[in-house]
Structure formats: C-alpha cells, structure tokens
Image (cartoon, rainbow, N blue to C red):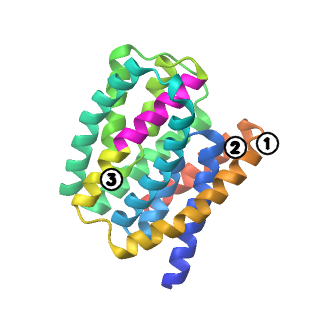
Amino acid sequence: MTDFLRYLLFLLTIFVTNTIQVITGFAGAMLAMPPAIRLIGVSAAKVVVTVVSGASCVYVVVRCWRDIEEKELLKILALMGIGMFAGVRFFHVMKLDILLKFYGVFIILIALKKLFVLRKFQLPPGVLYLCLLAAGFIHGIFVSGGSFLVVYAVWALKDKEKFRATVSAVWMVLNSFLLFDYWKAGYFTAETNGVLALSFIPFLLAVFLGNRLVKRITMEKFLLLTYILLLASGVVAIS
C-alpha cells in the first residue's frame, strides 16, 4: 500500500468515526484506533485520535460548563487517573501485537454485548467503581475507555446535560495528561504533526455532517451501525 493511500484511508477513518461520535456521543476513539494503528502506527494514531477527540470535548465543556457535576467529576478523575497511570505504564512494557489482540477482543465483546444482550441490569456500586479503574486502564493504553466510563456515568448522572458535560470534562482533563506523556515520549514528530493538521479537515466535516444527520435519522439505526462497525474494528485489530 502506498503512503498516499494509507493517509487517505486514515483521513477517511477520522471522518467516519467522528461523524458517528457526533451523532451517538461515544465510540469514536474505539472505532478509530485499530485501523489507525495499522495505517499510521501506534504513536501517531494515539496522538491524532487523542487531540481530535479532545477537541470536541473542549467545545462541549466551554458551552456547557455550568452543567458539570463537580463531585462526580472529581471522583471519576481520581479513580480513572489511577487506572490510566497503570495503563500507560503497561503499554510501555508490553508488546504491541499482544496489546492489539487484547484490545480487539475487548472491542468485539462490547459490540456483541450491545448487539445481542438487550437486557439491562443494575451493577452494585463496588463493581461500578471498578469500571472506572478499568476505564482509566483501557484509556491509558488505547485512548478508548469510554465504554466502561459510560457504565458508571449512566448510574451516577441521570440528567442528560450533566452526563454530557461531565463526561466531556473527564476526557478533556485526562487527554491533557495523555498528550503530555506523548510529548515526553517523543510522539510529536514532524510527520505526526502534519497528519494531525490534515486530520482537522475531515474532523470539521464530520462535525458538520453529524449535526445534520442527527436530526434526520433515528438514533437506533446509528447505534446499530456503530456496534457493527465496532465489531469490524475489533476484527481488524486481531487480524
């Protein structure tokens, strides 16, 4: 595959996954990371996906900062921060192929659960707090801890606006620490910075298209599409 085709496919990945992120409010990073790693490498993929996903979170926080539930935000940041610290260290000592297979299986299980296990049930508080540690751990490795965070946030944040604002604030803070770690690790190369700059073109197009589509197509259809794409993304990761 030529470099031109690789970068073109990567920019298309950014466009598609962020369109879905705008519509559904989740899964963008999980969808993007497996193909992004295959196309541009793990360090560049982590930088671009972290910055691009963080940009949408900053937008939400600036507009909706009054809706942030501060006590829950601090609790989430504390537990996810511990998990993320462990995840970052784990990433540096494990082989990428092993991590990718683990990540792929993780995504496939989430997709299969969403597609075929429709019954909802309430987890005890202790398990929900463990979900926050797991969310931080996965986020530290592959910038994709959203599924575990949502399990907790649905229980703790009943109001839709508080949910959206608080979760966005979580990602804004944690992604800032991740970007600092990436900078120290030397991930911000000239090539990566160039790809990052180009990525904002499909990202802005995705925001525009996503805001248009969310008013015209039912959320159920887009959630179904998201879970199918998650399944495909997981298969890509383990192949």
Q: Nearer the viewer, mark 1 or mark 3?
A: 3
Q: Are marks 1 and 3 in contact (CB under 8 Å)?
A: no
Percent across and percent down for residue 28 are 54, 49
- The residue that label 1 is drawn on is 217
Q: CA distance from mark 2 to mark 1?
A: 8 Å
Query: Please, which residue is most extreme toward the bottom here?
Result: 2
Query: Could you tell whether 215 is left or right of 94 in the image?
Result: right
Query: Could you tell whether 82 is left or right of 71 in the image?
Result: left
Label 3 sits on a secondary structure element that is: helix
Indicate whether 62 appears above or below 180: above
- The residue that label 2 is drawn on is 222
- The residue that label 3 is drawn on is 179
Query: Please, which residue is most extreme toward the right here?
Result: 216
Q: CA distance from mark 2 to mark 3?
A: 30 Å
Label 2 sits on a secondary structure element that is: helix
Going from the N terminus, do you reach mark 2 or mark 1 first? 1
Going from the N terminus, do you reach mark 1 or mark 3 first? 3
Q: Residue at x 60, y 23 (%)?
A: 160
**Mark 1 burial class by Cα count in 10 Å: few <14, some 14-19, many 20+:** few
Disc 1 residue type? Ile
Going from the N terminus, do you reach mark 2 or mark 3 first? 3
Disc 2 residue type? Phe
